[in-house]
Image: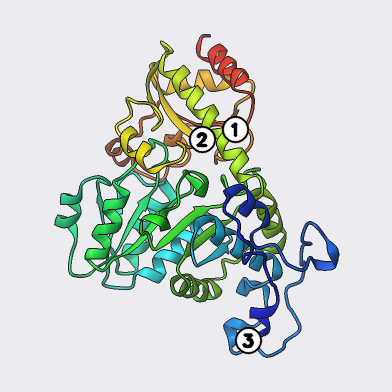
Amino acid sequence: MSRAGRTQKTSQKTSMENMETRAVHAGEPRPRIAGAITPPVFQTSTYETADESGYHDIRYLRLSNSPNHLALHAKLAALEGSESALVTASGMAAISTALLCALKRGDHLLAQRGLYGGTHTFMTHELPALGIEVDFVDGAERAQWKRKCKPNTRAFYMESMTNPLLEVGDLPAAAEFARENGLTTLIDNTLATPVNFRPVEIGFDIVLHSATKYLNGHSDIVAGVIAGDAARVGAAKLKLDHLGGSLDPHSCFLLNRGIKTLPLRVRKQNQNAQALAEFLQAHPAVAAVHYAGLPRHPSAARARALFGGFGGLLSFEHREGAAGARRMMKRLKLAVSAVSLGGTETLVTLPAETSHVGLRAEERADIGITDGLVRVSAGIEGEEDLRADFQQALSA
């Protein structure tokens, strides 16, 4: 075995049935490094060579094999229930690397409608420039998938919940359809997190995350994750080695730290988002609320069947459109107007002006993103305090 393979023994052999236990202990070095309870940051770019078997096995920071990386890879695989995992420099680095592994010139991709704006733009601008076709389909319409599937279709891309309308596709059917047609399945599980949903368990091949969001949970780093079987993740690592999107060791350290409280944070965010959604649904200034935990949501039944929780993200339509939404956002005292999501603090934003600003107006309208749509990322504050903050901001 190469030095890279034996550098770090982990605690994965220990039985860890509970998500909380895996979040704390999976991947941690055993024996502990110099007895340190918290693994140190290995702030070095290069390592003494030994018996590496090839270039990609050399101990070097860009090759994502520092002790900080290895601990994270094992922890993330344990959380997702996958054979392997890989961290990247951002969520988009994970998404683009995984797609470029699954597709080549002349291939065709099926992708769910209503994806995160950065993913949509990558698929509509970068992939066609590389000679790769993309067709967007309804995530719940198997008949449409069949019509759009071509002899050169190679992959099917989904999100566990779409951002910001929280639509849930027929994920088990998508995995089954892909198996029947020899397609690689990729799913962005950022919004659900492995606390609420583990796509590998229903047959998805590759699971992606913007670890910037819930996995880290503290709004202080940018990172991504690719998880899946060892062969596919190994291929993604080779691609990432060449593209250069590796995560720095200090960010690895912070991500490892953040993950340890992931189950606790996400369950509180589930609770806060549900409470806010129910409050907003009854408020006269709100025209509609999008949250899969509400019985009226079109994906409610599917979400109940698939997920252990409905997540910390919701969105709603202000009755006075963008002007009313902006007035409300300026009056909020606890919730912060800012991009991103998944942190300990509650954040609000207008997707038409942030996450989906790269889409043309007609593209946003086609997927239901209006100018007055407000996205709320519930934090871990007190439920009553959050309700009171939105109450005073909406009632002005």
- Of 151 and 8, the residue lying toward us: 8
The answer to the question of whether label 1 and label 3 lie on touching residues, with beta carbons closer than 8 A, is: no
Image mark for residue 312:
2
Neighbourhood count class around disc 3 (C-alpha, 10 Å): few under 14, some 14–19, many 20 upward = few
Q: Quadrant of the N terminus?
A: bottom right
- Of 380 and 117, the residue lying toward us: 380
The earlier-in-sequence mark between 2 and 1 is 2
Disc 2 marks a residue whose amino acid type is Gly
Where residue 188 appears, as percent x and y from the top left, is 43, 52
The answer to the question of whether label 2 and label 1 lie on touching residues, with beta carbons closer than 8 A, is: yes
The answer to the question of whether label 2 and label 3 lie on touching residues, with beta carbons closer than 8 A, is: no
Where residue 345 appears, as percent x and y from the top left, is 63, 33
Mark nearer the viewer, 1 or 3: 3
Residue at 76% x, 67% y is: 42
Q: Is mark 1 on a helix, strand or loop?
A: loop
Residue to which mark 3 is pinned: 1
- Give the CA distance from mark 2 to mark 3: 43 Å
Where residue 200 appears, as percent x and y from the top left, is 42, 58
Residue to which mark 1 is pinned: 379
Neighbourhood count class around disc 2 (C-alpha, 10 Å): few under 14, some 14–19, many 20 upward = many
Residue at 56% x, 34% y is: 269
Residue at 45% x, 52% y is: 198
Residue at 30% x, 35% y is: 365
